[in-house]
Image (spheres, rainbow, N blue to C red):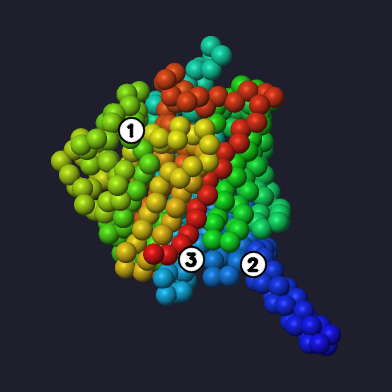
Amino acid sequence: MNILWKLTAGAVWLLLCAAAVEGRTNVRKEPFGNLPDGTPIDIYTLSQGPIEARVTNYGGYLVSLKVPDRNGKSEDIVLGFDNLDGYVNNNTHKGTAYLGPIVGRYANRIANGTFTLDGKQYSLAVNNGPNALHGGIHGFHSVVWKGELVPEGVELTYLSKDGEEGYPGNLTVVVRYTLHKSALTIDYSATTDKDTILNLTNHSYFNLKGQGKGDILNHNLTLHASQFTWADSTLVPTGELKSVEGTPLDFRKSTRIGERIDADYEQLRLAGGYDQNWVLDSGGRKLAEAAEVYEPINGRVMRVLTDQPGVQVYTGNFFDGTITGKGGIAYQRRYGLCLETQHFPDSPHHPNFPTTELKPGERFHRVTVFSFSTR
Protein backbone atom coordinates (compact mmCIF):
# COMPACT_ATOMS: atom_id res chain seq x y z
CA MET A 1 0.00 0.00 0.00
CA ASN A 2 2.83 2.37 0.90
CA ILE A 3 4.62 1.49 -2.34
CA LEU A 4 1.44 2.13 -4.34
CA TRP A 5 0.91 5.45 -2.58
CA LYS A 6 4.50 6.48 -3.28
CA LEU A 7 4.15 5.55 -6.95
CA THR A 8 0.87 7.41 -7.22
CA ALA A 9 2.22 10.47 -5.42
CA GLY A 10 5.28 10.42 -7.63
CA ALA A 11 3.13 10.29 -10.75
CA VAL A 12 0.99 13.18 -9.53
CA TRP A 13 4.12 15.20 -8.77
CA LEU A 14 5.47 14.59 -12.27
CA LEU A 15 2.13 15.63 -13.79
CA LEU A 16 2.11 18.80 -11.70
CA CYS A 17 5.66 19.61 -12.74
CA ALA A 18 4.80 19.03 -16.40
CA ALA A 19 1.75 21.27 -16.07
CA ALA A 20 3.83 23.99 -14.44
CA VAL A 21 6.38 23.87 -17.23
CA GLU A 22 3.62 23.84 -19.86
CA GLY A 23 2.00 26.91 -18.31
CA ARG A 24 5.20 28.91 -18.12
CA THR A 25 5.94 31.66 -20.62
CA ASN A 26 9.22 31.12 -22.40
CA VAL A 27 11.12 34.25 -23.41
CA ARG A 28 14.17 34.35 -25.64
CA LYS A 29 16.25 37.10 -27.21
CA GLU A 30 17.82 36.85 -30.67
CA PRO A 31 19.49 39.19 -33.18
CA PHE A 32 17.08 40.81 -35.65
CA GLY A 33 19.63 42.57 -37.85
CA ASN A 34 21.37 45.93 -37.96
CA LEU A 35 20.23 49.46 -38.74
CA PRO A 36 21.92 51.29 -41.63
CA ASP A 37 24.32 52.90 -39.12
CA GLY A 38 25.30 49.47 -37.80
CA THR A 39 23.26 49.54 -34.58
CA PRO A 40 22.34 45.93 -33.68
CA ILE A 41 18.63 45.26 -33.09
CA ASP A 42 17.12 42.37 -31.14
CA ILE A 43 13.86 40.49 -31.30
CA TYR A 44 12.18 38.91 -28.29
CA THR A 45 9.97 35.85 -28.59
CA LEU A 46 7.33 35.24 -25.92
CA SER A 47 5.64 31.84 -26.14
CA GLN A 48 3.22 29.84 -24.06
CA GLY A 49 1.48 26.82 -25.53
CA PRO A 50 0.08 27.68 -28.99
CA ILE A 51 0.38 31.47 -28.49
CA GLU A 52 3.54 33.30 -29.54
CA ALA A 53 4.36 37.01 -29.69
CA ARG A 54 7.51 38.54 -31.16
CA VAL A 55 8.61 42.07 -30.25
CA THR A 56 11.61 44.08 -31.43
CA ASN A 57 13.41 46.87 -29.61
CA TYR A 58 13.40 48.92 -32.82
CA GLY A 59 10.24 51.00 -32.44
CA GLY A 60 8.78 48.48 -30.00
CA TYR A 61 7.06 46.72 -32.90
CA LEU A 62 4.81 43.74 -32.32
CA VAL A 63 6.30 41.83 -35.24
CA SER A 64 4.07 38.78 -35.06
CA LEU A 65 1.33 37.28 -32.90
CA LYS A 66 0.31 33.66 -33.41
CA VAL A 67 -2.95 32.44 -31.86
CA PRO A 68 -5.00 29.27 -32.47
CA ASP A 69 -8.38 29.00 -34.17
CA ARG A 70 -11.22 26.75 -33.01
CA ASN A 71 -9.43 23.75 -34.57
CA GLY A 72 -6.18 24.51 -32.78
CA LYS A 73 -4.38 25.87 -35.85
CA SER A 74 -2.15 28.83 -34.95
CA GLU A 75 -1.63 31.67 -37.41
CA ASP A 76 0.00 35.07 -37.34
CA ILE A 77 -2.78 37.66 -36.97
CA VAL A 78 -0.86 40.95 -37.20
CA LEU A 79 0.36 42.70 -40.33
CA GLY A 80 4.05 43.48 -40.64
CA PHE A 81 7.31 42.64 -42.36
CA ASP A 82 9.53 39.56 -42.48
CA ASN A 83 12.67 41.37 -41.42
CA LEU A 84 14.08 44.54 -39.86
CA ASP A 85 14.74 46.15 -43.25
CA GLY A 86 11.01 46.16 -43.95
CA TYR A 87 10.28 48.26 -40.87
CA VAL A 88 13.24 50.59 -41.42
CA ASN A 89 12.41 51.17 -45.08
CA ASN A 90 8.75 51.84 -44.30
CA ASN A 91 9.78 54.46 -41.74
CA THR A 92 12.07 56.27 -44.17
CA HIS A 93 9.27 56.82 -46.70
CA LYS A 94 6.58 59.44 -46.48
CA GLY A 95 3.38 57.96 -45.10
CA THR A 96 4.74 55.23 -42.82
CA ALA A 97 2.06 52.61 -42.14
CA TYR A 98 2.87 52.13 -38.42
CA LEU A 99 2.61 48.34 -38.67
CA GLY A 100 2.69 47.46 -34.98
CA PRO A 101 4.93 49.93 -33.10
CA ILE A 102 4.71 51.83 -29.84
CA VAL A 103 3.41 55.26 -30.82
CA GLY A 104 4.35 58.48 -29.00
CA ARG A 105 5.01 60.95 -27.63
CA TYR A 106 1.51 61.74 -28.73
CA ALA A 107 -0.55 59.07 -30.45
CA ASN A 108 -3.04 60.27 -33.06
CA ARG A 109 -3.41 63.90 -34.23
CA ILE A 110 -2.65 67.33 -32.79
CA ALA A 111 -4.21 70.14 -34.81
CA ASN A 112 -1.78 72.32 -36.78
CA GLY A 113 1.18 70.74 -34.98
CA THR A 114 1.01 73.19 -32.06
CA PHE A 115 -0.12 73.22 -28.45
CA THR A 116 0.18 75.59 -25.51
CA LEU A 117 1.33 74.47 -22.07
CA ASP A 118 1.99 76.73 -19.06
CA GLY A 119 1.51 79.75 -21.33
CA LYS A 120 4.16 78.66 -23.82
CA GLN A 121 3.42 77.53 -27.35
CA TYR A 122 5.22 74.48 -28.73
CA SER A 123 5.62 73.60 -32.41
CA LEU A 124 5.70 70.00 -33.57
CA ALA A 125 6.61 68.30 -36.83
CA VAL A 126 3.63 68.42 -39.21
CA ASN A 127 3.37 65.05 -40.95
CA ASN A 128 -0.33 64.50 -41.67
CA GLY A 129 -1.77 67.27 -43.79
CA PRO A 130 -1.75 70.34 -41.52
CA ASN A 131 -1.46 68.23 -38.36
CA ALA A 132 1.06 66.37 -36.23
CA LEU A 133 0.48 62.61 -36.17
CA HIS A 134 1.78 59.81 -33.93
CA GLY A 135 4.67 61.70 -32.35
CA GLY A 136 6.16 63.17 -35.50
CA ILE A 137 8.56 62.13 -38.20
CA HIS A 138 10.97 60.50 -35.75
CA GLY A 139 8.51 59.37 -33.12
CA PHE A 140 8.79 56.38 -30.81
CA HIS A 141 8.07 54.08 -33.78
CA SER A 142 11.52 54.75 -35.24
CA VAL A 143 13.84 54.86 -32.23
CA VAL A 144 15.93 52.17 -30.56
CA TRP A 145 14.64 51.10 -27.16
CA LYS A 146 16.70 49.38 -24.49
CA GLY A 147 15.37 45.85 -24.08
CA GLU A 148 15.55 43.69 -20.97
CA LEU A 149 14.10 40.25 -20.29
CA VAL A 150 11.53 40.19 -17.47
CA PRO A 151 9.29 37.40 -16.17
CA GLU A 152 6.87 36.42 -18.97
CA GLY A 153 8.08 39.11 -21.35
CA VAL A 154 10.30 42.02 -22.28
CA GLU A 155 10.68 45.52 -20.88
CA LEU A 156 11.55 48.34 -23.28
CA THR A 157 12.94 51.66 -22.02
CA TYR A 158 13.52 54.91 -23.87
CA LEU A 159 14.64 58.38 -22.82
CA SER A 160 13.00 61.00 -24.99
CA LYS A 161 15.10 64.10 -24.47
CA ASP A 162 13.78 67.60 -23.86
CA GLY A 163 12.84 69.13 -27.22
CA GLU A 164 12.72 65.89 -29.17
CA GLU A 165 10.22 66.36 -32.01
CA GLY A 166 9.25 69.61 -30.30
CA TYR A 167 7.98 68.15 -27.02
CA PRO A 168 9.15 69.56 -23.65
CA GLY A 169 10.77 67.60 -20.85
CA ASN A 170 13.14 64.68 -20.51
CA LEU A 171 10.65 61.83 -20.61
CA THR A 172 11.55 58.32 -19.45
CA VAL A 173 9.18 55.73 -20.94
CA VAL A 174 8.96 52.08 -19.93
CA VAL A 175 6.78 49.65 -21.90
CA ARG A 176 6.36 46.01 -20.94
CA TYR A 177 5.03 43.32 -23.25
CA THR A 178 4.08 40.21 -21.26
CA LEU A 179 2.34 36.99 -22.25
CA HIS A 180 0.32 35.11 -19.65
CA LYS A 181 -1.92 32.21 -20.58
CA SER A 182 -4.03 33.50 -23.48
CA ALA A 183 -3.44 37.24 -23.04
CA LEU A 184 -0.82 39.69 -24.29
CA THR A 185 -0.51 42.68 -21.95
CA ILE A 186 1.09 46.01 -22.84
CA ASP A 187 1.95 48.06 -19.75
CA TYR A 188 2.96 51.70 -20.31
CA SER A 189 4.58 53.97 -17.72
CA ALA A 190 6.45 57.28 -17.92
CA THR A 191 7.92 60.11 -15.84
CA THR A 192 9.09 63.59 -16.82
CA ASP A 193 11.28 66.37 -15.40
CA LYS A 194 9.18 69.16 -16.99
CA ASP A 195 5.49 69.68 -17.71
CA THR A 196 4.65 67.87 -20.94
CA ILE A 197 1.88 66.05 -22.78
CA LEU A 198 1.75 62.31 -23.41
CA ASN A 199 -0.45 59.81 -25.22
CA LEU A 200 0.85 56.29 -25.81
CA THR A 201 -0.59 53.36 -27.74
CA ASN A 202 0.28 50.34 -29.85
CA HIS A 203 -0.57 50.55 -33.54
CA SER A 204 -0.94 46.92 -34.61
CA TYR A 205 -3.17 45.91 -37.49
CA PHE A 206 -5.11 42.72 -36.70
CA ASN A 207 -6.68 40.25 -39.07
CA LEU A 208 -8.14 37.24 -37.25
CA LYS A 209 -8.25 35.26 -40.50
CA GLY A 210 -4.46 35.48 -40.57
CA GLN A 211 -2.32 38.32 -41.85
CA GLY A 212 -2.56 38.78 -45.60
CA LYS A 213 -5.66 36.58 -45.93
CA GLY A 214 -8.04 39.18 -47.28
CA ASP A 215 -9.92 42.04 -45.68
CA ILE A 216 -11.46 42.33 -42.22
CA LEU A 217 -14.98 43.26 -43.38
CA ASN A 218 -16.53 39.97 -42.17
CA HIS A 219 -15.13 40.40 -38.64
CA ASN A 220 -17.79 41.12 -36.05
CA LEU A 221 -16.98 44.08 -33.81
CA THR A 222 -18.37 45.12 -30.45
CA LEU A 223 -17.43 48.46 -28.87
CA HIS A 224 -18.44 49.42 -25.35
CA ALA A 225 -18.85 53.04 -26.32
CA SER A 226 -21.96 55.21 -26.52
CA GLN A 227 -20.20 58.29 -27.91
CA PHE A 228 -17.44 59.30 -30.29
CA THR A 229 -15.46 62.48 -30.91
CA TRP A 230 -16.80 64.34 -33.96
CA ALA A 231 -13.96 65.20 -36.35
CA ASP A 232 -13.37 67.89 -38.96
CA SER A 233 -12.23 67.38 -42.54
CA THR A 234 -8.64 66.68 -41.38
CA LEU A 235 -9.87 64.02 -38.91
CA VAL A 236 -9.14 66.21 -35.87
CA PRO A 237 -11.83 66.38 -33.15
CA THR A 238 -13.91 69.54 -33.00
CA GLY A 239 -14.42 69.03 -29.26
CA GLU A 240 -17.99 67.81 -29.63
CA LEU A 241 -18.97 64.38 -28.31
CA LYS A 242 -21.69 62.72 -30.40
CA SER A 243 -23.93 59.78 -29.60
CA VAL A 244 -23.48 56.67 -31.72
CA GLU A 245 -27.25 56.11 -31.62
CA GLY A 246 -28.65 55.84 -35.12
CA THR A 247 -25.25 56.15 -36.81
CA PRO A 248 -22.97 53.63 -38.61
CA LEU A 249 -20.63 54.06 -35.62
CA ASP A 250 -22.94 52.16 -33.27
CA PHE A 251 -21.17 48.92 -32.38
CA ARG A 252 -22.71 48.46 -28.95
CA LYS A 253 -24.08 45.19 -30.31
CA SER A 254 -21.83 42.88 -32.30
CA THR A 255 -21.95 44.03 -35.92
CA ARG A 256 -20.12 42.96 -39.06
CA ILE A 257 -17.54 45.65 -39.83
CA GLY A 258 -18.42 45.71 -43.52
CA GLU A 259 -22.14 46.10 -42.92
CA ARG A 260 -22.13 49.92 -42.80
CA ILE A 261 -18.55 50.93 -43.58
CA ASP A 262 -19.53 52.53 -46.91
CA ALA A 263 -22.68 54.21 -45.63
CA ASP A 264 -23.40 57.77 -46.75
CA TYR A 265 -22.29 59.36 -43.49
CA GLU A 266 -19.99 62.36 -43.24
CA GLN A 267 -17.47 60.88 -40.80
CA LEU A 268 -17.09 57.77 -42.97
CA ARG A 269 -16.74 59.78 -46.16
CA LEU A 270 -13.98 61.92 -44.66
CA ALA A 271 -11.97 58.90 -43.47
CA GLY A 272 -12.73 56.50 -46.31
CA GLY A 273 -14.18 54.11 -43.75
CA TYR A 274 -13.68 53.75 -40.03
CA ASP A 275 -10.98 55.97 -38.52
CA GLN A 276 -12.69 57.54 -35.51
CA ASN A 277 -12.10 57.83 -31.77
CA TRP A 278 -14.76 56.19 -29.62
CA VAL A 279 -15.38 57.42 -26.06
CA LEU A 280 -15.37 54.32 -23.87
CA ASP A 281 -18.23 53.95 -21.41
CA SER A 282 -15.74 52.92 -18.70
CA GLY A 283 -14.26 56.42 -18.78
CA GLY A 284 -10.72 55.09 -18.47
CA ARG A 285 -10.96 54.88 -14.69
CA LYS A 286 -10.38 51.13 -14.44
CA LEU A 287 -9.33 48.15 -16.52
CA ALA A 288 -12.46 47.17 -18.43
CA GLU A 289 -13.44 45.54 -21.70
CA ALA A 290 -13.37 48.08 -24.51
CA ALA A 291 -13.93 45.89 -27.55
CA GLU A 292 -14.42 42.40 -28.86
CA VAL A 293 -13.60 41.13 -32.35
CA TYR A 294 -14.93 37.79 -33.63
CA GLU A 295 -14.03 36.03 -36.86
CA PRO A 296 -16.92 33.61 -37.55
CA ILE A 297 -15.20 31.34 -40.06
CA ASN A 298 -12.33 30.16 -37.84
CA GLY A 299 -13.82 31.15 -34.47
CA ARG A 300 -11.01 33.39 -33.20
CA VAL A 301 -12.09 35.92 -30.59
CA MET A 302 -10.01 38.89 -29.41
CA ARG A 303 -11.13 40.89 -26.38
CA VAL A 304 -9.46 44.24 -25.72
CA LEU A 305 -9.34 45.49 -22.13
CA THR A 306 -7.91 48.86 -21.16
CA ASP A 307 -7.92 51.66 -18.60
CA GLN A 308 -7.59 54.27 -21.35
CA PRO A 309 -10.62 56.54 -22.00
CA GLY A 310 -10.78 56.04 -25.77
CA VAL A 311 -10.10 53.70 -28.65
CA GLN A 312 -9.36 54.67 -32.26
CA VAL A 313 -10.74 52.09 -34.66
CA TYR A 314 -9.04 52.17 -38.04
CA THR A 315 -9.81 49.81 -40.91
CA GLY A 316 -6.70 50.22 -43.07
CA ASN A 317 -8.48 52.44 -45.56
CA PHE A 318 -5.26 53.73 -47.15
CA PHE A 319 -3.70 50.34 -48.03
CA ASP A 320 -3.51 50.12 -51.81
CA GLY A 321 -1.15 47.22 -52.51
CA THR A 322 2.00 49.33 -52.54
CA ILE A 323 3.18 47.92 -49.18
CA THR A 324 4.57 44.40 -49.45
CA GLY A 325 4.30 42.63 -46.11
CA LYS A 326 5.13 39.21 -44.72
CA GLY A 327 5.48 36.41 -47.23
CA GLY A 328 5.57 38.90 -50.11
CA ILE A 329 1.88 39.70 -49.70
CA ALA A 330 0.72 43.08 -50.99
CA TYR A 331 -1.51 44.65 -48.37
CA GLN A 332 -4.73 45.83 -49.95
CA ARG A 333 -7.42 48.17 -48.67
CA ARG A 334 -8.95 47.13 -45.34
CA TYR A 335 -6.61 44.18 -44.82
CA GLY A 336 -6.17 45.07 -41.15
CA LEU A 337 -8.01 46.47 -38.14
CA CYS A 338 -6.39 48.79 -35.60
CA LEU A 339 -7.77 49.14 -32.08
CA GLU A 340 -5.62 51.94 -30.68
CA THR A 341 -6.43 52.34 -26.99
CA GLN A 342 -5.60 55.93 -26.13
CA HIS A 343 -6.51 59.33 -24.79
CA PHE A 344 -8.49 61.40 -27.26
CA PRO A 345 -6.84 63.00 -30.30
CA ASP A 346 -5.97 66.69 -29.98
CA SER A 347 -6.71 66.72 -26.24
CA PRO A 348 -4.40 69.71 -25.53
CA HIS A 349 -6.86 71.92 -27.46
CA HIS A 350 -9.99 70.65 -25.69
CA PRO A 351 -10.26 71.22 -21.92
CA ASN A 352 -13.40 69.05 -21.83
CA PHE A 353 -11.34 65.98 -22.88
CA PRO A 354 -9.45 63.88 -20.30
CA THR A 355 -6.12 65.60 -19.74
CA THR A 356 -2.92 64.34 -21.35
CA GLU A 357 -0.66 66.56 -19.26
CA LEU A 358 2.11 64.94 -17.23
CA LYS A 359 4.01 66.85 -14.55
CA PRO A 360 7.23 66.18 -12.63
CA GLY A 361 6.58 63.92 -9.65
CA GLU A 362 3.66 62.23 -11.41
CA ARG A 363 3.76 58.81 -13.07
CA PHE A 364 1.84 58.02 -16.21
CA HIS A 365 0.59 54.43 -16.09
CA ARG A 366 -1.82 52.70 -18.48
CA VAL A 367 -2.49 49.07 -19.38
CA THR A 368 -4.03 47.35 -22.39
CA VAL A 369 -4.73 43.61 -22.63
CA PHE A 370 -5.40 41.58 -25.78
CA SER A 371 -7.06 38.35 -24.67
CA PHE A 372 -7.69 35.46 -27.06
CA SER A 373 -10.16 32.59 -27.17
CA THR A 374 -12.35 30.74 -29.68
CA ARG A 375 -16.06 30.40 -30.22
Q: Position of residue 300 (x, y in %)?
A: 40, 64
Residue at mark 2 to residue at mark 3: CA–CA distance = 15 Å
Instruction: Return the residue at label 2.
Output: 23
At x 54% / y 70%, what residue is drawn? 50
Q: Are marks 2 and 3 in contact (CB under 8 Å)?
A: no
Q: Position of residue 187 (x, y in %)?
A: 60, 45
Marks 2, 3: nearer the viewer: 2
Note whether residue 212 is visible: no
Q: Nearer the viewer, residue 111 or 363?
A: 363
Q: Is residue 237 left or right of residue 177?
A: left
Instruction: Return the residue at label 1.
Output: 227
Quarter-wise, where is residue 118 in the image?
top right
Figure quadrant of the N terminus: bottom right
Figure quadrant of the C terminus: bottom left
Quarter-wise, where is residue 111 in the image?
top left
Assign a secondary structure to mark 2. Answer: loop
Assign a secondary structure to mark 3. Answer: strand
Note whether residue 192 is visible: yes
Residue pushed farthest front?
1
The amino acid marked with disc number 3 is: Val
Instruction: Return the residue at label 3.
Output: 67
The amino acid marked with disc number 1 is: Gln
Residue at mark 2 to residue at mark 1: CA–CA distance = 40 Å
Q: What number is the disc on residue 237?
A: none
